[in-house]
Amino acid sequence: MPDTHMPNLKFGIGQPVPRQEDPVLLQGQGRYTDDLARPGQAYAVMVRSPHAHGVIRGIDTTVAATMPGVLGVYTAADMAGYGPMGCALPLKNADGSPIRNTARPPLAADKVRFVGDPVAMVVAESRMAARDAAEAVALDIEVLEAVTEASTAAAAPALYDEIPGNCVLDFHFGDSVKVAEAFAAAAHVTKLDIRNSRIVVCSMEPRSAIGEWADGRWTLHVGSQGVFGLRNQMAGIMGVAPKEFRVLTGNVGGSFGMKASAYPEYAPLLHASRALGRPVKWTDDRSGAFLSDQHGRDHEVTAELALDAAGKFLAVRLTAFANMGAYLSTVGPLPGSGNFVKNVQSNFATPLIEVNSRCMLTNTTPIGPYRGAGRPEGNYFMERLIQTAAMEMGRDANELRRINHIPTAAMPYKAASGSTYDGGEFTALLDEALEAGDFAGFPARRAEAAARGKLRGIGVGNFLECTAPPSKEQGELRFGKDGLVTIITGTLDYGQGHWSSFAQVLVTYLGVPFDSIRLMQGDSDLLVAGGGTGGSKSMMASGAAIIEASALVVEKGRPLAAEALEAAVVDIEFHDGQFAIAGTDRSIGIMELAAKHPGALDVQHVFDEAPQAYPNGCHVCEIEVDPETGIAEVVAYTTVNDFGVVVNPLLVAGQAQGGIAQGIGQALYERVAYTDEGQPITGTFQDYCLPRADNLPDIGFASRPVPATTNPLGAKGCGEAGCAGSMPAVMNALCDALGVAHIDMPATPEVIWRALQGR
């Protein structure tokens, strides 16, 4: 844990320091991929399939190739020799056999498998010339029957001859016999069919990339979540050693998991660059992003909870269909399999867990990680079960939560999921949230709403999520001749505010001036390790790397300080950014010492790894529904959270609010819809509804931290927790307002109106 006597408390750990990035971004001085213009660059436009499923009989590029400004038209025939993309996880079926992977080529070769599948790329002197030529590419596709729902995919035509029944993974976790016995012995069983709707990520910045070939190396300029891992993935696709590939990422306008891995467009860009001898740039438009960016969620789940007569949980069971889309993304099956297991238990002492998931291929956009990636879902299923069980049993839902909470005295707690929780005060946190949200005063507010003709409901989202385990992470520190200290890390900021928060850690442990710290994070050539940003692990990984690197700087500085102060090394102490002779007032500052010895204090360090952490909290939401129109409005929202040591409460509150907004969006507004033929009918912002500022209330935020014991900083991660609490809180509140056991997301006005008529 940090030394509480460290200097510069204004900029140390725990202070609400504004983001260093904001002045640049707010003045329009950010550098996103589409802002780049490489010397002599050409422009690419993708040709995408208009059909969800079909056999490619021919691609006629003759006309397109002769149009003004066109430099080249590329199809799968030009991409021979480049490696395919697929799932990178060594997952196993229930019978022990490996997952049936899909080998996705950069451009579709034999079949198209979803609307938007790239089949060709046109490169021209200008983007408009490339767009015109792309429209002239003639596709001869024999249309096949399509399937869009995972639950019906087994009976549909196979997307791949080698994957019968369209099932890539038949996942199982748990002891089926013991779980069945627990359900048979239960005094009460609650069962719900739950749809976790498909989401478009809708990042503010569409995907963009520039491929370059020069001096025998590939360079890819691209928005990403971490350049080190993407470099290794792209080097594998291009068939070269990692040292022959470079990834550069500048500012990134949002990702939420979607930009973490390689996409099929990148290899053709690189190929064309080498073929043409010039850089090739591609920037997607919003319509293309709706089709080709990995979607999130999309699960059909039967959730069951067994309880004894006292209301204690005996077992939870999930039986699910997880939609993978047309191809397996790098970690596509994880949310609907292993992350269900790790998160459905939440903070409750549930002795038995069983998860059966069938991960199915469909003729839809591939599924990838989306803010939480199975963690919000697991908590959502459990919270909906608890609320429904309370209604069915005539019990208080919060009391059910309390009697099933894992007690603080039981920590560390070995969960049935296999996780070991190192600490938490779950009941005290719940009670604090209920008080902060004035749960006791709700009946009066409900009565007042009723007098106005509105239905008012209150809901609780009591959650615990398992972060991704921190991977190896670089913590390099460089003291420049210009008086600046540079942190080099393999995580990557795409909106989180890493610069400020990482600088606060360095200020706390080394005492260097906050304004002298810079962050370098987007050049794979500078990295020897890096896990990227994802899974709410960045502060745990990079923060730990910075702490360990700081200790190495101090050790390197002691002999230099001893020489400068004419003292023995054993007599040198380090406090408050100063090397001092113990028991005297003689000292030298770390920045002065670095200036005297250029490069001598520089450190390149790799933090090994740490176990997962378990952020948790409780959201309290109130909703009002107009019964005449079915319109629901979130009118009050309060959260209390345990994120361990909070480095920057301002940024943490912002992360929570962002996740809450996305959870509200999924609960009430957002859903990808397809026709039976696989045509998306929510392909623009006119058809796909996002929450706006006036759809969101003021969000109360408070912390009740219990520091993690599994990483040097004591942090638990916070980036995705907002979704984990908001989805159940909003839907529990809505069900309470409507007086129904369950309603699926998104609860649009039409859905709510129909539910009211059915009631």
Image: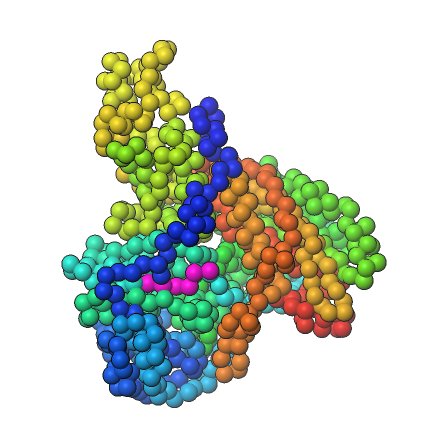
Q: Residue at x 69, y 42 (%)?
A: 436
The image quadrant of residue 569 is top left
Looking at the rendering, the stretch of residues picked out in magenta corresponds to 204-209
Please tell me whether residue 135 is drawn above or below residue 443 in the rendered image: below
Q: Can you give x and y, in whole percent of width and height, for residue 618 in the image?
A: 62, 47
**396 or 178: nearer the eye?**
396
Q: Residue at x 25, y 21 (%)?
A: 559
**673 or 431: nearer the eye?**
673
The image quadrant of residue 693 is bottom right
**Quick check: can you spot residue 403?**
no
**Quick check: can you spot residue 318?**
yes
| Magenta stretch: dominant secondary structure | loop
Q: Residue at x 41, y 39 (%)?
A: 502
Q: Verify whether residue 533 appears in magenta.
A: no
Please tell me whether residue 371 is drawn above or below residue 678 in the rendered image: above
The image quadrant of residue 381 is bottom right
On the rendered structure, is 702 left or right of 418? right
Which quadrant: the C terminus?
Answer: bottom right
Please tell me whether residue 318 is drawn above or below residue 590 in the rendered image: below
Q: Verify whether residue 207 appears in magenta.
A: yes
